[in-house]
Image (tube, grey):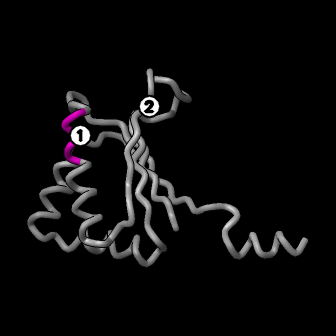
């Protein structure tokens, strides 16, 4: 399992609820198409966070790097529905930071740790 994290600030004058609705439509489309396992979006509470913390966190779970690659290829294929959903979300996004995470220790490392 891998977690694709998108830390997001919205474009000025973008409504948070409109963004949440657009993200939900896009993510449900990806999920129904089998190119992601699951997703969730969180919003920073009461503006609390480090100075560089963004307002929204979108976490997308994929089984492995192959599934993540399929998600990127699926989005790039540009069928009408996928392009419309992606473009709607993308136009609302201002600044974004992306990161890829995995559970740690991973199964291979956990086995080695057990031998120590």
89 relative to 106 in the view: left or right: left
Residue 19 covered by magenta stretch: yes
Q: Which residues are magenta?
A: 17-22
Image mark for residue 44 = 2
Crowd rating for badge 2 (residues with CA inside 10 Å; few <14, some 14–19, many 20+): few
Residue occupying the point 38% across, 74% down: 69
Label ID, residue 106: none
Label 2 vs label 1: CA separation? 14 Å
Numbered disc 2: secondary structure: loop
Residue 46 location, quadrant? top left
In the rendering, at what x and y percent does residue 43 appear?
40, 34
Tell which residue pokes out farthest to the top in this image: 46
- Residue 90 seen anywhere in this rendered image of the structure: no
If the image is split into quadrants, where does the C terminus sit?
bottom right
| Residue 25 placement (x, y as % from top left) | 20, 52
Q: Which residue is mark 1?
A: 19
Residue closest to the eye, 78 or 4: 4
Label 1: how many residues lie within 10 Å, few (<14), some (14-19) or many (20+)? some
**Is disc 2 in contact with disc 1, using a CB cutoff of under 8 Å?**
no
Q: Position of residue 38 (x, y in %)?
A: 38, 60
User: Which residue is drawn at the image coordinates 44% and 26% (left, top)?
Assistant: 45
Give the quarter of the image for residue 66. Answer: bottom left
Question: How many numbered callouts?
Answer: 2
């Amino acid at each position: 399992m891998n977690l694709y994290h998108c830390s997001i600030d919205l474009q000025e004058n973008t409504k948070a609820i409109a963004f949440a609705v657009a993200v939900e439509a896009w993510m449900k489309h990806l999920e129904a198409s089998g190119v992601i396992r699951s997703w969730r979006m969180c919003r920073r509470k009461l503006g609390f966070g480090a100075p560089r913390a963004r307002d929204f966190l979108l976490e997308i779970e994929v089984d492995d790097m192959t599934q993540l690659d399929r998600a990127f290829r699926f989005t790039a294929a540009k069928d009408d529905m996928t392009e419309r959903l992606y473009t709607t979300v993308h136009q609302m996004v201002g600044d974004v930071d992306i990161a890829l995470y995995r559970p740690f220790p991973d199964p291979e490392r956990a086995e080695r740790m057990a031998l120590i």
